[in-house]
Amino acid sequence: MESSQIREPKGQASDRDMNSNKTSQASEELQSNFKPELNEQLESQNQVVNALQSPEHEEEDVNETYYNFQLFLDQIQDTRCAPLIKYTRSFLRNFVTQRAIWSATEQDKLIKDFKTFIYSKYKDFKPFSDLNKTELRNAEEGMEKLLTGKLYHHLFSPLLAERAKAAGIEADKEHLDDIEKDKMFIKKVAEFKFIEPTNLDISFQNVKRVKKFTSFASIELNKMNNFKAPRDKMVCILNASKILFGLMKHSEETGADCFVPLLIYTLLSGKIENLVSNINFIERFRYSSLFRGEEAYYLSSLQAASNFILKLDKKSLTIENEKDFDTKYEQNIENVKQDQLQKEKLLKETKQEESSNMLDDVSNMVMNKLNEFFIQDEPQKEKKKEVHHKANSKNEDGEVASMIKQLEAKEHQETVETLTSMFPDLDVEIIEDVCIAKKHRIGPCVDVLLTLSN
């Protein structure tokens, strides 16, 4: 109970300051009569409120970039901007029909030039000409997501190589180089996955916490493979980086001298597929004006960390006991060989079945709607067919919206479960409250929870 809730004796309101000490004592006496567990709960709730209301977290929420892809889809279907649809449809058609395989450099230039062109046209057509700066940025983000989503199998190196192989042609050197580096990266991670933080000059006292946080950061990075837009992949990098910066902040370690080694250890802690291809995809197809300062820093840091691992050898590490290190290295190499043999045996004995998940279903339904939208159908001659088509469209819209809500609920639950594993000493209810307040953004959530756990 707060002191403001205790009534002052009638006629003594002017003595408020003189009696403040007595009031505080009364409040403390009342609270001392509560059960110990209730006192702990009240204290925890106060900690949550204080952490969430700190100026740093308020500023972070205010500066959060607005993004609404569904709003963009509604805007682009406005009949007043029909020429924008024609430009986009023409570009997509020419991109996939004029040549079977474009080089990475050619793709970069083609898509960048088209985005520059189409963004300049926004000012000529409503509703885009009426948008403010924030809404216009959202429209630019939306167009980038639309383009890369439609062309993803033509742009992402592993998928492009599969298409080229199926067509009996060879992919260009740049895309093949991405794939070769992806394989080399996985090989290097397997070779040195046994190393300790001290081998990278990471001197945190709580090594157990370092391993736990870097493990979860690697999971966030691996989520890049679930998305097709540069922005969405970049969000995965941001989440992972903010987890590491939260760890640094609450361990009194700062600066790139600490962050990059932590990032390297994160990459060695998990099996992150297609890392180089994902990094290069973002670099090629993320429009330069959409990059925020921190995004460029995190991406360049990830690039530096991946390059370090690609060239990693014993000389790159800090080793105190050579004999002990060599023993662990040889044992790890043997384990890697056994794992590979077991994997090959499993592939021979079992048939790999393709699985579908909700994210794939939602993505496919949205892309199907976009396909219908960008293919100019012949006008319906019969009114019944037109009504039936509209009814089906409404049903599909409702189904997509429902699936998106289910997907969001699943992602929110996974975030809570992840954070619960990271902070086992905190009550689940507190973690859920923080997630709701921070809109389930894992980076800000980690920062708040670290404050509460210290």
Image (spheres, rainbow, N blue to C red):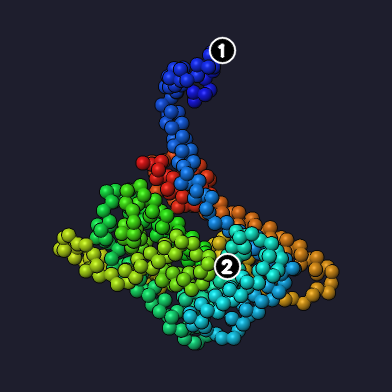
Cβ–Cβ below 8 Å for labels 1 and 2?
A: no
Of marks 1 and 2, which one's residue comes earlier in the chain? 1
Q: Quadrant of residue 375?
A: bottom right
Q: Quadrant of residue 34?
A: top left
* Residue at x 36% of width, y 56% of height: 214
348 or 137, which lies in front? Answer: 137
Which quarter of the rendered picture does the C terminus lie within?
A: top left
Estimate the x, y position of residue 415 in percent, counting from the top left: 48, 51
Q: Amino acid at mark 2?
A: Lys
141 or 220, which lies in front? Answer: 141
Q: Which residue is mark 2?
A: 145
Question: How much space separates mark 1 and mark 2, taking CA atoms?
Answer: 66 Å
Q: Is residue 226 visible?
A: no
Q: Residues within 10 Å of mark 2 (few under 14, many from 20)?
A: many
Q: Amino acid at mark 1?
A: Lys
329 or 70, which lies in front? Answer: 70
Estimate the x, y position of residue 402 in percent, counting from the top left: 64, 55
**Residue, far front:** 14
* Residue at x 48% of width, y 46% of height: 57
Estimate the x, y position of residue 7 in percent, counting from the top left: 54, 18
Query: Is 82 situated left or right of 196 in this image?
Result: right
Query: Is 310 situated left or right of 39 in this image?
Result: left
Q: In this figure, what is the number of numbered marks? A: 2
